[in-house]
Amino acid sequence: MLNKNDIVDVEIVDLSHEGAGIARVDGLVFFIENALPGESIRMRVLKVKKNIGFGKVEEYLTTSPHRNQAVDVAYLRTGIADFGHLSYSEQLKFKRKQVVDNLYKIAGLRDIEVPETMGMEEPLAYRNKAQIPVRRVNGQLETGFFRKHSHDVMPIEDFYIQNQEIDQLILFVRDLLRRFDIKPYDEVGQTGLIRHLVVRRGHYTGQMMLVLVTTRPKIFRIEQMVEQIVDAFPNLVSIQQNINDKHTNAIFGTEFRTLYGRDTIEDSMLGNTYAISAQSFYQVNTMMAERLYQTAIDFSDLTADDVVIDAYSGIGTIGLSFAKKVKAVYGVEVIEQAVEDARKNAERNGITNAHFVAHSAEKAMENWKKEGIQPSVIIVDPPRKGLTESFIKASVAMQPRKITYVSCNPATMARDIKLYEELGYKLQKIQPVDLFPQTHHVEAVSLLIKE
């Protein structure tokens, strides 16, 4: 029987969906960080539970030819790039396998062809948004990232998957905060002023927004700080302060103040222009989001006669992308501010046939049905937890010809596809898309056709 701190030689046989190496010893499944299939390692046992254990690499006896030797282990320890140690071509294969395995294990589908994962030419420095904690580390104010499963900040200067200009802005502000002797937040003692730096950047416009998240309204000599930041970064069109005095993991509090410029930045996606506020949901990888949405549009094979429901419509990025090709778009989103933004975005792009409501998707569809609205296509883009059973039934009750499902979690997608198949919608095709290179996340678009 293995105990904590035992050392044992093991073979890595697989990867968990979060990127940990898997080894089997004494009837137990061990999860080991930074270990790849095909590698032999000397493992130290960290923890043993009933059927599973956790270990760490003491020594590599053999290494995988697919190991990316260049990656800094800090990225694996923080979860910023939990797949960074695996070569990119293998990451794409692994993500396809995730989709295949989930369709088979959860939905019982084995005969559907799953193409190669759609990936990026340059799978680094793609993120257009950063949310960076500010804490004291070894007596000095630092910006970085939380170590996995903890609230300890690891100082990081190059975030690897973030746009480089965002990294430069964070370091500039960090140095300024040190110089002005601004106190970083201390979670335990509930002291200090500055909690987070949030940065957004338009991929096509280059416009940037900086949000200083503070525990109280007053920031000493803020005018001088703002002046220096704006001088150094001419692309900065918005500096905001958010006040969050709650003892919470949520980054933002409810109150925003504009310290400089506007309260939104602009960017474009698939030819439309969007205003993005500090809180807007906007995909963090613009180039791959365009490919993801374009795949959904292509799968839906839209015509000028189509009436489309865009469920979980956010600020309108999917629905407005194809609105000019179809008869009408009906979008529903539960967050009122997002619906307000979607309406403004429709106006901004001269789109008059898109209608957005703030409601639960189920309720909106019931209302639309009563009004006699008959969609030919329903496009869904739910959060990680997938669709509710009541939503699936409400969407089937609308009797669309097609349901196009954009997913960020292949397990919940497979579960939902299974129910759709039972209710008479058959999975026709599916395409994995890599929106988050260097991480374990995978998106997919699937098309269901009414039988």
Image (cartoon, rainbow, N blue to C red):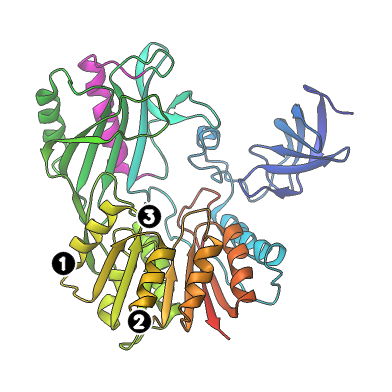
Magenta range: 162-185
> Which of these two is toward me, 378 or 45?
378
Label number found at residue 347 = 1
The number of numbered discs placed on residues in the rendered structure image is 3
Q: Earlier in the sequence, mark 2 or mark 1?
A: 1
Of marks 2 and 1, the one in the foreground: 2
For disc 2, the neighbor class at 10 Å (few under 14, some 14 to 19, many from 20) is few
Residue 431 placement (x, y as % from top left): 53, 70
What is the spatial separation of the Cα atoms under label 2 and label 3, in whole angstroms?
37 Å
Seen at 24% across and 69% down, the residue is 271
Q: Earlier in the sequence, mark 2 or mark 3?
A: 3
What is the spatial separation of the Cα atoms under label 2 and label 1, in whole angstroms?
25 Å
- Where 380 falls versus 30 (above or below)? below
Q: Could you tell me which quadrant the C terminus lies in?
A: bottom right
- Where 166 falls versus 220 (above or below)? below
* Pointer 3 residue: 285
Label number found at residue 372 = 2
Residue 286 is a magenta residue: no
Residue 147 falls left or right of residue 33? left
For disc 1, the neighbor class at 10 Å (few under 14, some 14 to 19, many from 20) is few
Label number found at residue 77 = none
Residue 390 placement (x, y as % from top left): 52, 64
Which amino acid does the dot numbered 2 rest on? Answer: Gly
What is the spatial separation of the Cα atoms under label 1 and label 3, in whole angstroms?
24 Å
